[in-house]
């Protein structure tokens, strides 16, 4: 098995001081600390809360591991849910070392070559793994579990559980490349806050899961779909969506700016939670759009991802002041289903009829979203509605909020120009996104990295093209031009953008309240997904898939069936900090319909050795499809509506 590359762990590249790498709170640090969005001292300034028997975060629900006699017998060790594994570990029926080796063996067999941002023909869910460090962590977890058995020392249910982390999230000593070899040498000096909290809980960190180039594409091609490697995995958290379902990890962390947790969860049939803005610290994440970016868990079952969310959420005032907006203590995250045959009684779930779908190159406005679904997906959706009603919920169609109406939506994808800065127009959302990017040194940090001598000349060109700007009258793109533009947005213009964003949030909230809707039900993907090579990616999908991030609202995704051997997944989403409510409903559904999240894909046949590229390639690191970047996504919507 290929490990992390020699010489990249626990090193500070020549030419940069450790002070320069770490940076300070509230800004993105330079060089190898580029991943530290709101300060690189996440592990020091925001230690995980003391573990209890149920969880480690401030939102931990009340539940323990199931009794051994209540655990169903599953075919393989890697098929057990995290809650079940916690019981087996505590009872001494299995060790963390055994469990970790089981996942590492599958990675070795099915993942394919590491450090390859391309279609290898394998799962390619993990881009780098440190087997030695993972087994050392597993041995340490086994000691903690043994101490628990002797004296009932407080122990997280996650202790000894192997997980993967998206390639845009800092793991101390690991290169963090955000889907591109251009970031080779970008070594995290500290764990991201969420990673530090997982490590403190005893999680075994396997390594980095692959993501789309620069966390861009929401379709993805680098990884292979968990159910059929010939199909797209969804992005940008590609590997984090594939790995749990393919049994390469018990669960993973994903990161989303505009679809990057929900889309790979939906495409692979994983269960995922995209939290509200501020629920989980994003310190240690390579930023795309601050005040949109969020971290969340992706796994197989709702209760597993709920446990992970409860572990990583909570205030991180020094490194991510956005977390101060969340309730503290946070509403208790549930870990188990409610009793009785009608656990959803009293809930009203709305199906928004103006949640327009993208079909091919156009947006189907003026028609019910369900009318655009493929026949198989529509049948699954109708069955799901019936099942939710049988569980006691009121499920009804309601208008929702028409994002094409500028009176209702003065912010997202607006064609209004609030100002012209350095020769470029500034839309309402651009005023917010780009001003936030300036504050976290979005372009400046990349410039510092490029000037450090770490990246090769070709990498500098790639990074300049990706993060730079070519302003009017300029002969070429530059990072300095981007930084100048971001920093030139007047405070009054930024304020106007923020006010419009708040107006959109208020209008969306009113749209739900006017119809007594608690939260919404949608299908983010309305038809069978396409092939990685030469396919259509997502032939039918929600046109406004980025809106939950623009609102800062939570969303969950869970599998509800299959069509043509590929998953069909549904999503609940609703008001900010409603994680407990929508997660509880998801847990209640899965408890009565476990066949969907327990479904297991057959292992793929690895391609011939000659068919898999094993050399790094800068030219292979391109992916098409809808973008995770809100400004690019909004521009695409404007063009589609013309």
Image (cartoon, grey):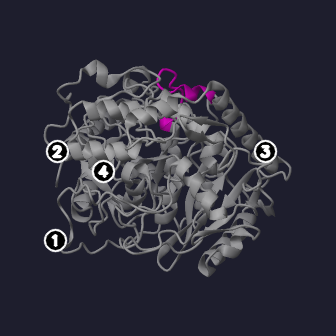
Mark 4 secondary-structure assignment: loop
The answer to which of marks 2 and 4 sits earlier in the sequence is: 2
| SS type, badge 2 | loop
**Residue 119 at x, y percent in the picture:** 30, 65
Q: Secondary structure at mark 3?
A: helix
Say which mark, if any, is on residue 507: 3
Image-quadrant location for residue 185 = top left
Q: Which mark is residue 498?
A: none
Is 167 placed left or right of 308 in the picture? left
Q: Is residue 131 left or right of residue 24?
A: left
Residue 609 is labelled as: 1
Name the residue: 44% across, 24% down. 46
Taking 516 as reference, is 173 left or right?
Answer: left
Q: Earlier in the sequence, mark 3 or mark 2?
A: 2
Measure the alpha-carbon separation of dots 4 and 1: 34 Å
Determine whether, in the image, residue 356 is placed left or right of residue 320: right
Estimate how packed mark 3 is, as few (under 14), some (14 to 19) or many (20 or more) residues with alpha carbons within 10 Å.
some
Pinpoint residue 205: horizontal percent, then vertical percent: 31, 43
Disc on the earlier residue, 1 or 2: 2
Task: From the top left corner, tell me how far across and down residue 193 is, in percent.
Answer: 42, 31
Q: Which residue is mark 4?
A: 94
- Give the extent of the magenta segment: 311-325
Comparing labels 3 and 1, the label whose residue is closer to the camera: 3
């Amino acid at each position: 098995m290929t490990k992390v590359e020699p010489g990249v762990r626990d090193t500070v590249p020549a030419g940069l001081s450790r002070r320069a790498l770490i940076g300070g709170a509230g800004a993105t640090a330079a060089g190898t600390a580029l991943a530290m969005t709101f300060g690189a001292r996440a592990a020091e300034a925001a230690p995980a809360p003391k573990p209890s028997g149920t969880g480690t975060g401030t939102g931990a629900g009340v539940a323990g591991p199931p009794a051994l006699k209540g655990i169903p017998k599953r075919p393989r060790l890697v098929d057990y849910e995290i809650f079940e594994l916690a019981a087996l570990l505590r009872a001494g029926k299995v060790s963390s070392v055994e469990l970790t080796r089981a996942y590492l063996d599958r990675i070795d067999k099915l993942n394919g070559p590491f450090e390859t941002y391309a279609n290898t023909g394998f799962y390619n869910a993990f881009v780098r793994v440190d087997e030695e460090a993972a087994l050392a962590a597993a041995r340490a977890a086994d000691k903690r579990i043994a101490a628990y058995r002797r004296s009932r020392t407080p122990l997280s249910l996650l202790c000894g559980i192997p997980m993967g982390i998206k390639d845009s999230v800092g793991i101390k000593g690991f290169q963090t490349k955000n889907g591109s070899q251009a970031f080779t040498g970008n070594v995290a000096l500290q764990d991201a806050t969420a990673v530090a909290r997982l490590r403190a809980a005893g999680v075994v960190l396997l390594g980095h899961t692959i993501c789309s180039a620069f966390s861009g594409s929401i379709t993805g091609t680098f990884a292979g779909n968990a159910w059929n490697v010939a199909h797209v995995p969804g992005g940008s958290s590609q590997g984090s969506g594939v790995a749990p379902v393919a049994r390469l990890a018990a669960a993973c962390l994903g990161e989303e700016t505009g679809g990057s947790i929900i889309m790979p969860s939906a495409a692979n049939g994983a269960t995922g939670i995209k939290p509200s803005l501020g629920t989980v610290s994003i310190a240690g994440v390579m930023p795309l759009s601050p005040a949109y970016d969020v971290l969340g868990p992706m796994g197989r079952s709702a209760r597993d991802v709920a446990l992970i969310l409860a572990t990583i959420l909570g205030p991180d005032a020094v490194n991510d002041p956005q977390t101060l907006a969340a309730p503290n203590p946070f509403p208790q995250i549930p870990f188990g289903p409610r009793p009785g045959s009608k656990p959803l009684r009293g809930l009203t779930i709305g199906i928004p009829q103006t949640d327009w779908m993208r079909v091919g190159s156009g947006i189907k406005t003026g028609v019910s979203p369900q009318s655009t679904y493929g026949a198989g997906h529509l049948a699954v959706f109708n069955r799901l509605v019936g099942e939710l009603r049988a569980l006691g919920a009121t499920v009804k169609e309601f208008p929702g909020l028409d994002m094409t109406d500028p009176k209702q939506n003065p912010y997202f994808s607006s064609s209004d120009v609030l100002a012209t800065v350095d020769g470029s127009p500034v839309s309402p959302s651009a005023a917010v996104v780009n001003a936030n990017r300036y504050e976290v040194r979005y372009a400046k940090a990349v410039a510092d990295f490029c000037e450090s001598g770490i990246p090769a000349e070709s990498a500098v060109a790639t990074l300049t093209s990706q993060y730079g700007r070519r302003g009017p009258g300029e002969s070429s793109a530059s990072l300095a031009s981007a930084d100048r533009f971001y920093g030139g947005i007047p405070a009054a213009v930024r304020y106007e953008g923020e006010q419009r964003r708040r107006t959109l949030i208020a209008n969306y909230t009113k749209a739900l309240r006017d119809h007594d809707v608690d939260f919404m039900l949608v299908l983010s993907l309305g038809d069978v997904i396409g092939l990685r090579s030469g396919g259509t990616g997502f032939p039918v999908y929600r046109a406004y898939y980025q809106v939950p991030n623009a609102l800062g609202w939570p969303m969950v995704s869970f599998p509800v069936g299959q069509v043509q051997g590929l998953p069909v997944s549904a999503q609940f989403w609703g008001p900010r900090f409603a994680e407990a409510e929508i997660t509880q409903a998801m847990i209640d559904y899965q408890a009565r319909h476990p066949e969907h999240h327990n479904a297991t894909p057959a292992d793929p046949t690895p391609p011939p050795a000659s068919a898999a590229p094993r050399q790094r390639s800068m030219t292979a690191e391109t992916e098409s499809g809808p973008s995770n970047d809100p400004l690019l996504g909004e521009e695409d919507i404007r063009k589609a509506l013309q």
